[in-house]
Amino acid sequence: MKIRHLSNSIFTTLLLVFLSFGSSVLAQSKKKTLKVLFVGNSYTYVENIPQITSIISDSLQTKLITKKSVIGGAKLRDHWLGNRGLKTKEIIKKNKFDIVVLQEWSLGTIYESDSIRKYAKLFCDLIKDKGAKPYLYQTWAREKVPQHQETIAKVYEEVATANEATIVPVGRAWELAKQLRPTIKLYDADGTHPSRLGAFLSAYTFATTITGEMPGSLSRIYSTNDSQGESVYLMYLDNLDITFFTEVVKKIVIPRN
């Protein structure tokens, strides 16, 4: 009798483990996915913002599968004309994306606003023609000229309205984070590119804007796999920073969704 009772207990335990594992796999298989192309320059690829965005989405109901077409210093004009070997138009035409994110160079809204209006429209028309949705990556002001943020935000918002595109308010998120915690280090040493923290806040803003979801919890360690299947470390965060950024994103993104 004891042996039979023990066998039944083992069977029950194994069954529960199997059912739990099966439910987890089923939930993952039912998870909605969106394919997202990031078009931009170093403001997009420094500190791996697209990859971090995708990893954050693992904590959401919607998985974001991200790709990028980038080169340092590129303007939307360069992407459209195929300068410097860029093949962004071909990538959009030949692939099935759900969302395409457009990023103008960091001072484009300040000194060349006519250019962003022209090429954003061309790209938005192409993106919509291919059945995808255009998103605009509203960037941040450089560290030494915070007063530029209003102009940056205004131009992106006008371009978004004119082209029925969605704003990803990264610049506004940075602005609020700096107001709430003036000592926070969002910039790299050059005062223009994102630091590890700046990139995480940017990616967090992307993930929540695109999905309309807030994660229940977030990991402190972010990594991905290279072409050989080896794990590549991307960043490590403190829980206090994650909590702080969650409050920032809630105030900036959620009211828009």
Image (cartoon, rainbow, N blue to C red):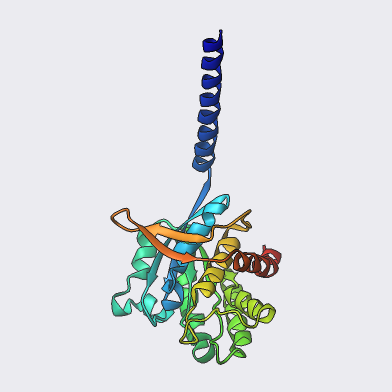
Between 30 and 89, the one nearer to me in the picture: 30
Q: Nearer the viewer, residue 224 or 74?
A: 224
| x, y percent for residue 190 | 46, 87
Residue drawn where x is 48% and y is 63% of the image: 52
From where the camera sits, is residue 56 visible? yes
> Is 27 located above or below residue 158 in the figure?
above
What residue is at 54 percent from the left and 25 percent from the top? 13
Q: Position of residue 194 (x, y in %)?
A: 49, 78
Q: Residue furthest front?
A: 2
Residue at image location 66% in from the left, 70% down from the top:
248
Would residue 111 appear left or right of 229 to someone viewing this image? right
Horizontally, is 126 left or right of 8 in the view? Answer: left
Q: Quadrant of residue 79?
A: bottom left
Q: What is the quadrant of the C terminus in the image? A: bottom right
Residue 170 placement (x, y as % from top left): 58, 73
Image spot of residue 245 (x, y percent):
62, 68
Between 42 and 88, the residue placed more toward the observer is 42
Count up the numbered dots: 0
- Whether residue 217 is situated above or below residue 248 in the rendered picture: above
